[in-house]
Amino acid sequence: MCDGSNNLSRRDMMRLGATGVAAASVANLPVRADEKAEAGKLPKRRYGRTGLEIGWLVGASDWTKELIPKAVSAGVNYWHKAQAWNANSLPAALKNQPRESYYLECVVDRVNGGHERGQIDEEQHYQFVKSRVKASGVGYYDVFKFHFGYHSVEEAKQNPGMVRAFERLKKEGLVKHLAISQHHYNNIKGDMAWEIMHYLADNRPYEATQFFHTFGDRKEVEEWIEVAKKKDIGTIAMKTMGGVGRAAQDQKFQKLLADPKYQGSTPAAAMIKWLQSNENLTAAVIATKNFDQLHENMGAATSLAMGPQDHATLALLSGYNKGLTCLLCAECVSHCPEHISIADIFRYERYGRDYLDLDRARSEYAALTRNGTSCVGCGDCLPACVQEIDIPTKLKDVHRLLG
Ligand code: SF4
Ligand code: SF4
């Protein structure tokens, strides 16, 4: 049942017993009174102006074929990056259901150069989605999502190409809703994600947003989630599991976690419950590689309130992450005279160290024009880091891992 190639240590953590979150102990945690979720089923929330009621955990097309039917029966009904499926690879667990019972999201990238150097090109985006609808046989995508988003508010004002491509496709019945996955672009003199999303909410027809969000995040992200709820804009958190994978592989962390005050909790389960406790947040993308992780995530996401042990576990993780794990806030980036994409480099580190996906991490790292070797050690970035990370040293370390 497990994906052997990604036999992540969260399962090992569970196997350690004293520190793990066995299914039975999760089931014994208190049921949240206000959630009214059907037992064993994922709670659903309204995805902003799209009006779609989506499962709180978002599925992804790169999940293994064994996981997908289990996720579907547990209530996962929104599928991220669904454009990767064609008519043959579209999972039977979806294909055999009525089309309106699940939601497929097509992510649309810039062309000719990746998310920093690539361009918005209405015709190419239009043709791309049209060709994916045809190749997949799905009839339509529920959500057209601008992947990585605008570089700045100015670009969102000046360049209507992505919106026009969506509108043409919508007229033809090939897509239904418009969303954006927004990154920070202060490394290329652009704007922060929340600045761009605030602009879009009032000025462009975007109905939903996706952005980085984890425990200990900047207040601007929390503020965006609150504003988005008031304006009926959907919100999906991504890159949520900072440090969870590496903590699970760290014997010292495991020993600390064996203390009875953490019993019945794990960093992953505590993080999921913490995210879910924000009722303004629609849903979350959680990297899921195998059945044990799916089981653990579903257990945490299904009708469970945070208990004292979860608060304690998050505090432990937070202390562990200090000086070690980047939260991807990008605060340091604009201080770097060498214009190094520090947060992107540490995001790739996360793929390698937390998700154990070194191939992806190395391939993304290789595409950078300025990597960790461009650091001159000036230290200008250091005062900006809320995590007190020794950024130049870490850049060298990550280069050894990914370079
Ligand atoms: S120490 Fe390195 S990463 Fe930090 S500001 Fe200087 S050049 Fe940039
Ligand atoms: S290195 Fe520090 S300041 Fe820079 S993105 Fe990471 S957490 Fe934020």
Image (cartoon, rainbow, N blue to C red):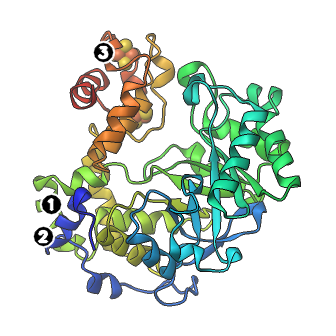
How far apart marks 3 and 2 lie (CA) works out to 39 Å
Q: Position of residue 298 (x, y in %)?
A: 42, 75
> How dense is the environment of label 1, judged by Cα within 10 Å: few (below 14), some, or many (20 and up)?
some
Question: Is there a contact, CB below 8 Å, between mark 2 and mark 1?
Answer: yes
Which of the two labelled residues, at mark 3 and mark 1, occupies the earlier sequence position? 1
Q: Which amino acid does label 2 sit on?
A: Leu
How far apart marks 3 and 1 lie (CA) works out to 33 Å
Indicate yes or no: mark 1 CB to ligand 2 under 8 Å: no
Question: Is there a contact, CB below 8 Å, between mark 3 and mark 1?
Answer: no
Q: Nearer the viewer, residue 194 or 11?
A: 11
Q: Residue furthest right?
A: 171
Instruction: Give the quadrant of the C terminus.
Output: top left
Q: Where is residue 4 in the image (x, y as percent from the top left)?
A: 22, 62
Judge whether 326 appears above or below 341 on screen.
below
Instruction: Give the quadrant of the N terminus.
Output: bottom left
Please name which of the two marks, 3 or 2, marks the residue nearer to the observer.
3
Q: Which amino acid does label 3 sit on?
A: Thr
Q: What residue type is labelled 1?
A: Gln
Which of the two labelled residues, at mark 2 and mark 1, occupies the earlier sequence position? 2
Judge whether 339 appears above or below 112 on screen.
above
Q: Where is residue 140 in the image (x, y as percent from the top left)?
A: 73, 61
Question: Is there a contact, CB below 8 Å, between mark 3 and mark 2?
Answer: no
The residue that label 1 is drawn on is 254
Q: Residue at x 37, y 25 (%)?
A: 366
The residue that label 2 is drawn on is 16
Q: Which residue is drawn at 62% across and 38% down?
A: 109
Residue 325 seen: no
Judge whether 31 appears above or below 150 on screen.
below
Q: In which quarter of the image is residue 294?
A: bottom left
> How dense is the environment of label 2, judged by Cα within 10 Å: few (below 14), some, or many (20 and up)?
some
The residue that label 3 is drawn on is 373
Q: Which of 257 and 148 is in front in this view?
A: 148
